[in-house]
Amino acid sequence: MRLFLTVFLLLTSNWLFCQDIKTSGFFDQIVKHDVSDLWTLDEFEIGIEGETMGKSEPYGFIGDNYQRLFIHIISAIQNPKNELEYFIFGKTKVKTNICSFQGKIKIIASRTYDQGDVPELKQGFFTGEYEFYEDPDEKGTGIFQGVFRTDFIIDTNGNFRYDGLHFAADGFKNNQFEGTWTSYKSNKSKKCNWGDYRIPDSNELDYGAGEFSPGKEFEDYGWKNYRLAWGYNEETLETKEARKREEEKWWIEK
């Protein structure tokens, strides 16, 4: 855990000081709000006109070859005895192997921007740690550990919302999770990151400028269908079928 705390402090430092943007502490206030739906929502508002759109599933990878990881948080419940902690249940998929997991997310810091993009809305973020345990009775399971950042908006009614103000801008991202997966069986760890619309520290995997775009050399590591679905503008039968596969709710038992 000391390693993750060190990484957390470094990430927080970078997020706060890489740009000359003034922020104010929000930690004492975040404890008063239930933010669980920011990890489980199916749609969110974009821009400032209130237009709503469906949220894509997170993009993720595991290992040095950037093997594609699917992850879906099914439920997040605020701990009534510790409002900064959330009980998490979800599922992962790597190749054809689907596993269930449960664990915790803990908020450690939160700040709001002194001057947001829209005067009537307050923008901010919170950061923290996560630890998810896959079911040890299932095949190829282990523990996810790391740090995360989530961006939010507080509207004029005091409601927390997923920050989608800049969805149309290049490089949009949210819910960035960065850490490792450690096998129960071998006790060996692999780099494992995921996020909404971008993946943190994805290096050569993502060569897209405006939006996430995995390179052709990673097709054999689970990214072929994604490239077929979204890497081309042509509305062919093949791309339509690929998009259907991308939109499958694989975490729902049939």
Image: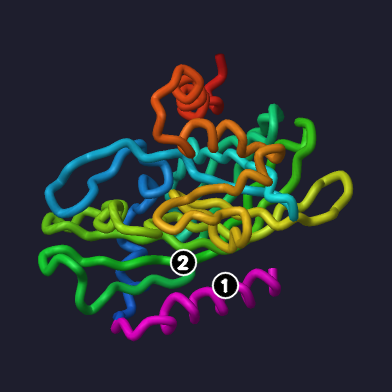
Side of 163 relative to 236 (left or right): left
On the image, the x and y values in percent for residue 201 come to: 59, 63
Q: Residue at x 60, y 48 (%)?
A: 215
On the image, the x and y values in percent for residue 219 come to: 66, 39
Q: Is residue 239 above or below residue 29?
A: above
Q: Is residue 136 magenta?
A: no
Residue under label 2: 127
Instruction: Name which residue type carries label 1.
Output: Phe
Q: Residue at x 36, y 53 (%)?
A: 35
> Overall secondary structure of the magenta stretch?
helix
Q: Secondary structure at mark 2?
A: strand
Instruction: Name which residue type carries label 2.
Output: Thr
Side of 219 relative to 176 (left or right): right
Q: Residue at x 12, y 58 (%)?
A: 156
Q: Is residue 73 above or below residue 11?
A: above
Q: Are marks 1 and 2 in contact (CB under 8 Å)?
A: yes
Q: How is the image coloured?
A: rainbow
Give the Cα distance between marks 1 and 2.
Answer: 8 Å
Q: Residue at x 44, y 58 (%)?
A: 209
Q: Which residues are magenta?
A: 1-22
Please identify the quadrant where the C terminus is shown.
top right
